[in-house]
Image (spheres, helix red, strand yellow):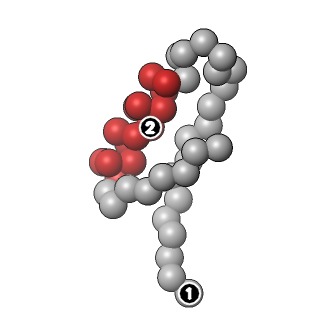
């Protein structure tokens, strides 16, 4: 599992694209990418 954060939806989308590229490397069998909003209490 990898965790990261983004300040905009555009930044999150670019991170998804990088994850898709990384998933093409040998050894990866699958990946899932999810964007969720974190809110305060």
Residue 10 in the image: x percent, y percent? 30, 48
Q: Residue 27 at what x, y percent from top left?
A: 66, 17
Q: Is residue 14 above or below residue 36?
A: above
Left or right: 27, with 16 as reference point:
right
Q: Earlier in the sequence, mark 2 or mark 1?
A: 2
Q: Which residue is mark 2?
A: 16
Placement of the N terminus among the 4 image quadrants = top right
Q: Outermost residue toward the top?
A: 26
For the residue labelled by badge 1, is the local secondary structure a helix, a strand or a loop? loop
Viewer-proximal residue, 30 or 26? Answer: 26
Tell me the residue at 49%/24% (across/down): 22
Residues tagged 2 and 1 counted as in contact (Cβ below 8 A): no
At a point 58% along the width and 45% down the height, the residue shown is 2
* The quadrant where residue 21 appears: top left
Disc 2: CA contacts within 10 A as few (<14), some (14-19) or many (>=20)? some
Residue at point 55%, 51% (across, down): 3
Label 1 crowd (10 A; few <14 / some 14-19 / many >=20): few
Q: Among all residues in the image, which is located at the extreme bottom?
A: 41
Q: CA distance from mark 2 to mark 1?
A: 27 Å
Q: Which residue in the structure is indicated by mark 1? A: 41
Horizontal relation, residue 1 to residue 38: left or right: right
Q: Please indicate whether residue 17 sits to the left or right of residue 41 in the image.
A: left
Q: Quadrant of the C terminus?
A: bottom right
Query: Which residue is at 38% across, 56% downward?
Result: 6
For the image, the number of numbered tags is: 2
Residue 36 is situated, as x and y percent measured from the top left of the image, at 53, 59
Q: Indicate the secondary structure of the residue bearing disc 2.
A: helix
When the figure is inspected, residue 2 is found, relative to residue 18, above or below; the finding is below
Numbered badge on residue 6? none
């Amino acid at each position: 599992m990898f965790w990261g954060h983004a300040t905009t939806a555009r930044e999150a989308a670019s991170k998804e694209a990088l994850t898709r590229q990384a998933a093409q490397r040998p050894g990866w069998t699958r990946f899932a990418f999810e964007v969720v909003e974190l809110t305060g209490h």
